[in-house]
Each structure stands twice: as C-alpha cells, then as structure tokens.
Image: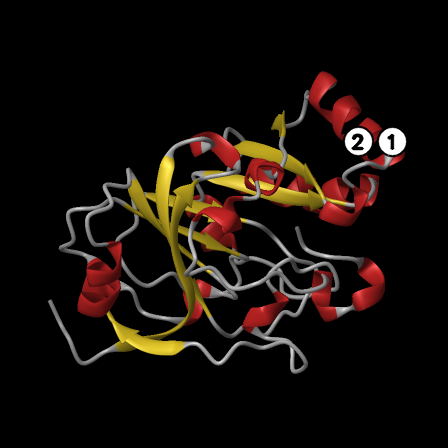
C-alpha cells in the first residue's frame, strides 16, 4: 500500500450508515475537507465554509486504517466535502469494502464496491457517474428538486434505486414530505424510494468523540443546525 499519498481528513468516526440501501449497517466514515459546490443546505459545511471550516489533518491510507483500529465495520465510507476530488486507489487492497458518497461531478478514482451519487444543481453529475451509480440520493426541497434529474436518470440508469430525502431544514415540512410520498406512490418513471437521515435521529455524533461538532446548514446560522 502506498504510504506517501495523504488525504485532508475533516473527521473519522465509527457509526452506522444512516441513508440509502445500506441504512442501519455498521460503517466507518472518512470525511474529507474541501468542496467546490458549497450547497446552501449542506450539512457538512465545516468541510468548506470559510467561517466554519475545520483545519483537520492530512493522513495516509495507513494512518486512516490505523484509526479504524479494533472496529469491525461492514464497510468504509468516503464522504465529504467532496471525496471524488481525491484518488482513493491506495485503498484498493484493504480488507474492507469501500463506499463513496459523491455529487458525481468529478471522476471517481479508486475501486469502490458501492457508489452513491447525490446530484447537485450547482455542479451536475457526469453521465459516466450516473451510469456507475449503485444508488442515487436526491435531496428534496420541492417537486422541482426531483424533476430536474428524472430524464438524466431515466436515460442512463433507469433501474437504479433513487432515494428521495428531505432537505434537513424541510424534514418537518408537510409539503416537502407530501411531494416525496406522491413520487414514491406513483413511481412510474423511476425506482423511487422514500429516504431520511436516520443517523441524525440517533444523534450518532455523540457516540464517537472523533466527530466534529455540527455547524449551521450551509454555514448560514439562519438555516438552523445540521443535526
């Protein structure tokens, strides 16, 4: 395993996957700093926002795996920030299956057993990454959040599970939740599934002291806390 390459790590923690097809399974998360998208509702703004960015550490694959320690997760999750800014091929020989959660706008470098694409209007996913996706997660504020991606997914990966997750600030909004319910009940075009951020209900950050304290959504105090 190459030891010279390092990654700008924002936080490392052992928890469970709170979203998508692997929801509820034990997972070790590697969250990197840096993201050129900067979504207004980002729940990890500490990875990029100028007022909240956490310094973090530059760690090699060996050092990251050392942090996994005695934990026995079902898989490692590379997330961010935007993890596809980095080349993860140094992890190709690890014993753990590797997952990545990306906006899909950048080339995915490394061997991953599971690819989650969460498309963003500010930086749309490439066709290659839509085709490669094992699941797609759409963050929903309103109906247009879903409709803007329908044709792209239908054309290039129509059988993929498409999770509709309410934007955290809209999690109690009946209109947003109603849109998700309607799309799932009338899922003629795509394989829509209702999603939620289960890890936030469990407040998993409290169970591993390596996690970074939550910051406001998108770095905007008016939008409320990210957890």
Look at mark 2 in the image and give the residue it sits on.
Answer: 177
Residue at 51% from the left image edge and 49% from the top image edge:
206
Quadrant containing the N terminus in the rendered view: bottom left
Residue at 78% from the left image edge and 48% from the top image edge:
169
In the depicted view, which residue is nearer to us: 13 or 78? 13
In the depicted view, which residue is nearer to us: 194 or 105? 194
For residue 142, which quarter of the picture?
A: top right
Q: Residue furthest right?
A: 175
Residue 119: percent from left, percent from top: 61, 53
Residue 227: percent from left, percent from top: 66, 50
Residue 197: which numbered mark, if any?
Answer: none
Instruction: Give the side of residue 74 with respect to residue 177, left or right.
Output: left
Look at mark 1 in the image and give the residue it sits on.
Answer: 174
Residue at 52% from the left image edge and 66% from the top image edge:
81
Residue 78: percent from left, percent from top: 39, 56
Q: Secondary structure at mark 1?
A: helix
Q: Residues within 10 Å of mark 2 (few under 14, many from 20)?
A: many
In the depicted view, which residue is nearer to us: 220 or 89? 220
Way the structure is coloured: secondary structure
Q: How many marks?
A: 2
CA gap, disc 1 and disc 2:
5 Å
Vertical side of 150 occupied by 57: above or below: below
Vertical side of 58 occupied by 166: above or below: above
Residue at 51% from the left image edge and 57% from the top image edge:
104
Q: Give yes or no for contact between labels 1 and 2 (Cβ–Cβ under 8 Å).
A: yes
Residue 217: percent from left, percent from top: 72, 60
Instruction: Give the side of residue 1 with respect to residue 143, left or right.
Output: left
Vertical side of 15 occupied by 81: above or below: below
Q: Residues within 10 Å of mark 1 (few under 14, many from 20)?
A: few
Q: Secondary structure at mark 2?
A: helix
């Amino acid at each position: 395993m190459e030891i010279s390459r390092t990654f700008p790590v924002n936080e490392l923690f052992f928890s469970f996957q709170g979203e998508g097809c692997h929801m509820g399974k034990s997972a070790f998360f590697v969250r990197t700093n840096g993201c050129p998208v900067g979504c207004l509702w980002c729940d990890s703004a500490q990875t990029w926002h100028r007022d909240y960015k956490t310094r973090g550490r530059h760690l090699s694959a060996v050092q990251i795996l050392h942090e996994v320690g005695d934990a026995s997760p079902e898989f490692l999750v590379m997330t961010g920030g935007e993890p596809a800014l980095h080349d993860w091929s140094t992890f190709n020989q690890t014993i753990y299956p590797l997952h990545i959660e990306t906006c899909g706008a950048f080339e995915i470098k490394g061997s991953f057993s599971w690819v989650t694409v969460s498309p963003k209007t500010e930086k749309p996913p490439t066709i290659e990454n839509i085709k490669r996706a094992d699941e797609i997660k759409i963050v929903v504020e309103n109906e247009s959040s879903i409709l803007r991606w329908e044709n792209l997914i239908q054309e290039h990966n129509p059988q993929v599970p498409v999770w509709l997750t309410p934007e955290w600030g809209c999690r109690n909004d009946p209109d947003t939740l109603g849109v998700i319910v309607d799309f799932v009940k009338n899922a003629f075009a795509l394989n829509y599934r209702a999603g939620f951020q289960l890890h936030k209900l469990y407040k998993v950050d409290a169970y591993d002291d390596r996690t970074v304290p939550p910051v406001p959504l998108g770095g905007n105090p008016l939008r409320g806390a990210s957890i």
